[in-house]
Image: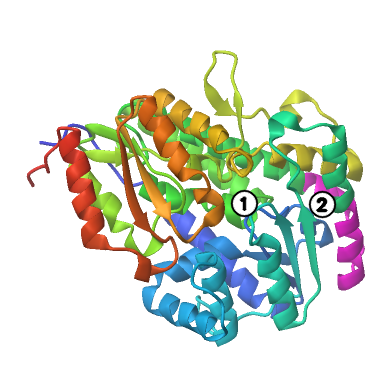
Amino acid sequence: MPKYPTEQLKCWNKAKELRDKYYRDYAEASEKGGLRWTGGAWSFDAIPAGLGDDVYPITGEPYAASIAFNKPFSLRCLEATESKGWARDLCAYMRNYWGSMYLDEYNGGGKYPKPDFAFQDHICCSHAKWYQHVAEYKNIPYFCIDVSVGPYKDINDDKLDFVVGQMHESIDFLEAVTGREYNDEKLIEAVKNDCRTTSLWAEICTYNKNIPAPLDEKTMYSLYVFGTLMRHSKDVVDFYRELLDEVKDRVARGIAAIPNERCRLMSDTQPPWGFLKIFRYMESFGALSVGSLYSFALMGIWEDKPDGSWGPRTTPMDLGIPMDTREQALRVLADWNLSKPEWQHFYDADLKSKMMIRIAREWKLDGVMLHMNRGCEGLSCGIAENRVAIAESEFPVMTFEGNMGDEREFDEAKTKDRIDSFMETLGLEQLKE
């Protein structure tokens, strides 16, 4: 018999509509007189927002993840990239994206919509080169901001000045290549929305500390993504506020993500997008992934709370930090994003281990499953050290090999065997229908 009541999210259809509108707006921007730009999910999308309300981005990682989910198209994209001589051990997102560009096919249908410019930041090893190649291949202008200034705990004014100075230069670049006059008021509002979006998402994730968890990670993948698409947008802020209210209500009413939650796990890094059904297989044991550092903090911005817990970072607006000028807005934008948890472990695996162990304790986990993801060097960096540290903290750890964007490197049967063995070590058997 089910232990907990469940129900579909009331805002689920709105989420689908918002995501569809995002890709449709990008595809149709030029015919409506707007601008299109491409860059990474971590790019400072609040900055191009100062060019006007008709400026539409397509962020490469979520676009490539949607390609990976479409396995027949993904295979053609990957093979198109390999036919150009690129190695298979490069970022799988980048290879899917480039393949779409080479084939001149858009995952949403029709031809690949050519961007007007590329706008990126660089922290992962492939970020700058990804869009350098796009810019050269499509003959478009390109600007990249170097944000690799060290972990946030070591940030000082000189390092912040280095990033903010590049932001100022990027605005000059945008005005020059688009012929548009920059609007600081739109920038300021976009920065405020960036802060609201990322703080709201972190707050939403804290409610999964509840037993039973109101959300499962497979569902969360379809929700966190808006922070990777257009976190500067008021539409996303409004949606996350609605989602937060619904999650609070689910907790108050005891609504669970799955009816038989009896084991709480977390994952790590991007999942194998073409095989998300492994999460449903885990649920057949009553095992739920409540999230991960990836789904919580790829976009969520966090801070230590007075009670010692990890919670959403207090927005600069709530702290009364002024944002009346371009300089003030850019400085807030830089500081806010440099504190992103998923940026910290590019410098030291120990920083990631500590955050993962903190999640394991605060979210009351029974175990951890680590994806040895060959498709992403950046987020998989130090994963062997993470496994040892988590195990030494007395949390059972399971590992499985795969690739978030290349189905050829994922063995579904072998992964299910590993899940079976892990569940056995946790004392769990598959639930009867």
The residue singled out by tag 2 in the image is 186
For the residue pair 319 and 16, the one nearer the viewer reads as 319
Residue that extends furthest to the left in the rendered view of this protein:
432
The tally of labels here is 2
| Segment tinted magenta in the rendering | 168-189
Q: CA distance from mark 2 to mark 1?
A: 15 Å
Q: Is residue 258 visible?
A: no
Q: Earlier in the sequence, mark 2 or mark 1?
A: 2
Residue 125, by quadrant, is bottom right
Determine crowd level at label 2: few under 14, some 14-19, many 20+ residues with C-alpha closer than 10 A. Answer: some
For the residue pair 188 and 390, the one nearer the viewer reads as 390
Residue 380, horizontal then vertical, whole percent = 49, 50
> Is residue 172 located in the magenta-colored stretch of the structure?
yes
- Secondary structure of the residue carrying tag 2 is helix
- What residue type is disc 1 on? Asp
The residue sitting at 62% across, 39% down in the picture is 344
Residue 4, horizontal then vertical, whole percent = 22, 33
- What residue type is disc 2 on? Lys
Residue 194, horizontal then vertical, whole percent = 69, 44
Relative to 105, is 265 above or below? above
The residue sitting at 29% across, 43% down in the picture is 7
The residue singled out by tag 1 in the image is 235
For the residue pair 232 and 144, the one nearer the viewer reads as 144
Relative to 188, is 95 above or below? below
